[in-house]
Amino acid sequence: MPHLLFALWIRTRLVLHRLRLVMTDSAHQHLPLFPENPRPCSLDMLIDYLPRLTDHTDIQVTCLEQYKEYSNPAQHEFVLARVRYKLSGKDTQGALILERGIQPPTSHERSLSDSDLGSIPSRSSQSVQSALHASSVSSSNPIPAFGEAILAARAESLLVGRNVGPPFRTFHVDGGHESATDSLMKLVAMARLVHEEFPHYQVHKTQCYFFGSLLYELFTRVLRDTTKKFLPNLKPKVMGRVAFFRSKIGQLPESVIIHLVELFHSKAWPEVEQMVLEQKASLLASARILMAEEHAQELACERARAEERCAQVLANERIQAEEQHIQDLANECTREEEHIRAAEERLAQLTREMEQMKEQMAQMSARIARSG
């Protein structure tokens, strides 16, 4: 009985483990990464999600575009990446926007009216405009920045409601070059690196302009473009930027770009590669655990069957022993009955002999009496 309970426990654990794997696989394989309707996602969530996709290395950025969104009185900038990947064996396209803003105001804080923000669909864009309008935000008063990615199946759906013209610069990725391997993961890792190195939002320094331009420069210096010449842009562009106090904002020092390129190669990307290895190791460990539990279940079932066979053999032996004992008793009874019948027959024979002797004695007595 205890072994049967152990086998049942093993089977239950195996079923739960398989259910967990099925739920994990369905969450990471069947949900589209680039949905028809734009879907916002934090950088941390996205970079944690991508390594769990079995084909994440096949999702390639084909081009990176930097846009300027016109609004009154401020402007907003962001980068848009167009990607190519396979879905159910077919070539598919997707797109995502990477931008910076501040956390939206809470319900008890006063913000701009809906009419001011009605034409801007992005939560990050709304936050940026709130920051640019709010009097509490200044270069001397940094606040936590909010980095966000917005994913969709088509780039056009990401630009709906945004007052943008053509991108003011575009970088076409050379998909055949080794630097393009896992380019989407690299782009997201770069965005998180910029956000980690400059976690605060300042209107005159580390705002959306700074984030978009730095991310664009970083990406173009790590990957090669379609000209087959690995000559990155050495000077960041700040054309069309809003002027505050007669100075352009969002300008990038060359030392900052070089530092982030080195930091990406030495720290950020190795950490992502290590995370991918850990994810693969986790999946491999889960598969090994599943195989071990299946083997343990087989052993437990085989043990339970062996114990059932052993119990059946013992039961059969007991039954055979009892039947043999009964047979022995029956044979003994048969022999005793035969002895009794033999004794009865002997007794009957002796009785007949006595009767004969009595008759002979009676005849002798009669002859004696006649002769006398």
Image (cartoon, rainbow, N blue to C red):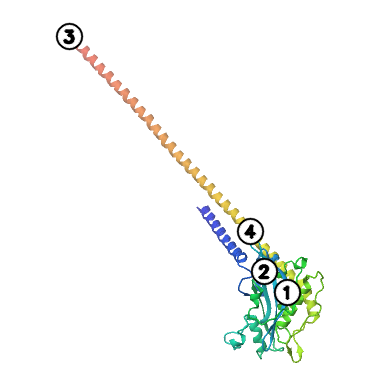
Q: Earlier in the sequence, mark 1 or mark 2?
A: 1
The crowd level at tag 4 (other Cα within 10 Å; few <14, some 14-19, many 20+) is some
Give the answer, above or below, for where 31 lies relative to 104. Answer: above
Q: CA distance from mark 2 to mark 3?
A: 149 Å
Q: CA distance from mark 3 to mark 4?
A: 123 Å
Q: CA distance from mark 1 to mark 3?
A: 159 Å
Give coordinates of residue 172: x percent, y percent. Answer: 75, 72
Task: Tell me the residue that label 1 is attached to.
Answer: 64
Task: Tell me the residue that label 4 is attached to.
Answer: 287
> Mark 1 near mark 3, Cβ–Cβ under 8 Å?
no
Mark 4 residue type:
Ala
Task: Tell me the residue that label 2 is attached to.
Answer: 93
Q: CA distance from mark 1 to mark 2?
A: 14 Å
Using the image, tell me which numbered label, if any, was put on residue 370: 3
**Pick the front one: 69 or 194:** 69
Q: Nearer the viewer, mark 2 or mark 3?
A: 2
Q: Earlier in the sequence, mark 2 or mark 3?
A: 2
> Mark 1 near mark 4, Cβ–Cβ under 8 Å?
no
Say if residue 372 shows up in the picture: no
Q: Residue furthest front?
A: 166
Q: Earlier in the sequence, mark 3 or mark 4?
A: 4
Mark 1 residue type:
Leu
Mark 3 residue type:
Arg
Under tag 1, what secondary structure?
A: strand
Res. 176 image quadrant = bottom right
